[in-house]
Amino acid sequence: MSSNSPPKKKWRQSCLSFAAVTAVDKPASYSDGAHSASSHFSQFNAVLLALDGNCMFSALSDQLSALCIADASAYQLRHDIVQYLRQHEEIVLNVNFQMEHKMTFEDYLTYMSQDGVWADGIVLEVVVKMFNRPVCVHESDGNIIKLSAPSLSTNAKPITLGFISASGTGTVNHYISLRTRDDEPLNKDRGEFGIADDDHSSCSKTQTTAESVVVTKSSDIGDYMSNTVPLQEDLKLDLLQKCWEPPDTYNFKFDATGKRVFHHPWLEQYKPWLAYSKSQKGAVCRYCVLFPQPVSRGLQEAFIVKPFTNYKDFHDSARSHANCEWHKASHEAATNFINTVTGKLLPISQQVNVHEAAAIAAN
């Protein structure tokens, strides 16, 4: 969502500058969700946003609202930032897009304009210029990265983001918004992801001492591949029934490792088990990911523990997977789970009680 990596010094700057500051006392290692935000960014009110590939834009949206700079959705921000960069190509004058991104400048603009595409250091460069504000990124390992420009006032309150690294966690890299303690409370009159509602005054300030953290789980089923932590039933049901699906306009060529790419109609053709993971950049089986089966012999590979990306043989491989014993067992487990949690099938313990009651009545 967003995972993406924060900007590093390797990014070329024009009139912008990065300053990496290492914290004296680094916090404990990152664990998960709200605990991570509270332990690493305790001096802030942290807003954790959806792991949907738009996290940097969502965090920027929240910051701009808190600083009374602008009220714009993540979607609008993405559009405006791309358009600003298109009109101010001098910001990236010395970036070799072919070498660094394997695409032209125009291809980059088209790619970055797509919903769910992870933002990068170039986006933060544009934000500094576009809103005439410094940007400060607090990393979960204690480092602080500052982006500024010579023309900016040193007294200007920075746009402050947090970056939770996926290193060693089995999750994805993620940006969050870090509000100062004198900003408005995050749990009052605010939308689903901590963004101010349209009729709410985003510039009102209220002293708050309570720590507020909004946590939203990823809907990309690939983020749960080889997951060892039991998932909550409501999350598992959501992933089974409505996990993230690429829009019709999604450009799969940017995910491909070879000449052949995934085709959107395949999702309908192999529905309901087939899913596409943006984080894994390939096809996965939602049943086998959420209800993994024990391995008595053989080796579980594509669709199950890693994404399928060999699209030349996709149809043969998809049919073979659908007929394998692992898939059949996972499919049965998923069906029983859905029937149980939706009330169509009683849990085993209750089924036993019902059978016992029926036997007693019969005698």
Image (cartoon, grey):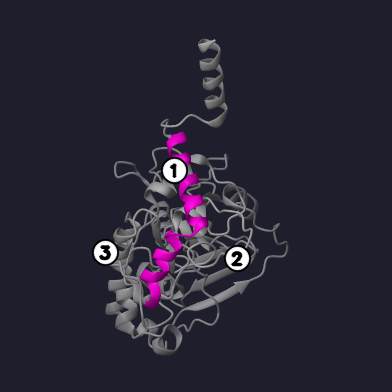
Magenta segment range? 312-341
**Most frequent secondary structure within the magenta stretch:** helix
**Of 285 and 359, the residue lying toward us:** 359
Q: What element carries label 3?
A: loop
Residue highlighted by disc 1: 335
Q: Mark 3 points at which residue?
A: 248
Helix or strand or loop: what does disc 1 sit on?
helix
Q: Is 302 left, or right, of 262 in this rendering?
A: right
- Residue 269 visible? The answer is yes
Asked if 82 appears above or below 329 in the picture, the reply is below
> Secondary structure beneath disc 2?
loop
Query: Mark 3 vs mark 1: which is more N-terminal?
Result: 3
Q: Where is residue 260 in the image (x, y as percent from the top left)?
A: 36, 79
> Exactly how many numbered labels are in the figure?
3
Residue 298, numbered circle: 2
- Tell me the crowding category of disc 1: few under 14, some 14 to 19, or many 20 or more residues within 10 angstroms, Cα based: some
Residue found at x 62% / y 60%: 169
Taking depth in this image into account, of 358 and 217 the one nearest to the observer is 358
Q: Is residue 193 visible?
A: no
Question: In this view of the protein, which residue sits in the foreground, 186 or 222?
Answer: 222
Q: Nearer the viewer, mark 1 or mark 2?
A: 2
Tag 2 and tag 3, C-beta contact below 8 Å? no
- Counting residues from the N terminus, which is met first, the one under dot 2 or under dot 3? 3
Residue type (three-letter) at the residue carrying disc 1: Thr
Which badge, 1 or 2, comes first in the chain's sequence?
Answer: 2
Residue drawn at (52%, 31%), measured in percent from left and top?
Answer: 347
Q: Looking at this rendering, what residue extends furthest in the right direction? A: 25
